[in-house]
Image (cartoon, rainbow, N blue to C red):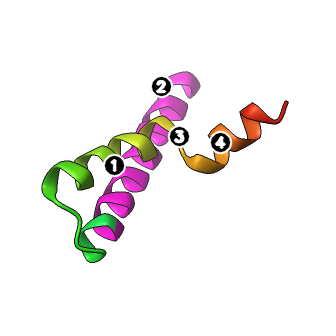
Amino acid sequence: MSIWSRFTQRRRRKIEEQRDAAVARAMARGATPEESAAAGDRAARGDTAATVFRISNI
C-alpha cells in the first residue's frame, strides 16, 4: 500500500467519523432523520457556520 493510499484511507475514515458524530449530535437534539442526514453531510464537507463565517470575513 502506498503512502498516498494510506493518507486517503485515513482521511476517508476521519470524514466518516465526523459524519457519524454530527448525526449523533443532531439526533440527540431531536432532529428529524432528514435534518440529521443534512448535518452529517455538512460535517463531511466541512461546511459549517464557522467555515462560512471565516470565508465571508476574508
Depth order, front residue of 43/8: 43
Q: CA distance from mark 3 to mark 2?
A: 21 Å
Q: Which residue is mark 1?
A: 40
Q: CA distance from mark 4 to mark 3?
A: 7 Å
Check disc 2: other Cα within 10 Å, few if <14, some if 14-19, many if 20+. few
Quick one: label 4 or label 2, which is nearer the N terminus?
A: 2
Quick one: label 4 or label 3, which is nearer the N terminus?
A: 3
Q: Which residue is mark 3?
A: 46
Depth order, front residue of 14/5: 14
Q: Amino acid under label 1? A: Gly
Q: Which residue is mark 4?
A: 51
Looking at the image, is 25 positioned above or below residue 7? below
SS at circle 3: loop
Span colored in magenta: 1-25
Residue 2 is left or right of residue 54, and the answer is left
Depth order, front residue of 44/52: 52
Quick one: label 1 or label 2, which is nearer the N terminus?
A: 2
Quick one: label 3 or label 2, which is nearer the N terminus?
A: 2
Residue 30 painted magenta: no
Pointers 1 and 3 in contact (C-beta within 8 Å): no
Q: Nearer the viewer, mark 4 or mark 1?
A: 4
Q: Which residue is mark 2?
A: 5
Q: Dividing the image into 4 quarters, which one contains the C terminus?
A: top right
Considering the whole magenta stretch, tell me its main secondary structure. Answer: helix
Pointers 4 and 3 in contact (C-beta within 8 Å): yes
SS at circle 4: helix
Residue 31 is left or right of residue 22, and the answer is left
Quick one: label 1 or label 3, which is nearer the N terminus?
A: 1
Quick one: label 4 or label 1, which is nearer the N terminus?
A: 1
Q: Amino acid under label 3? A: Gly
Q: CA distance from mark 4 to mark 2?
A: 27 Å
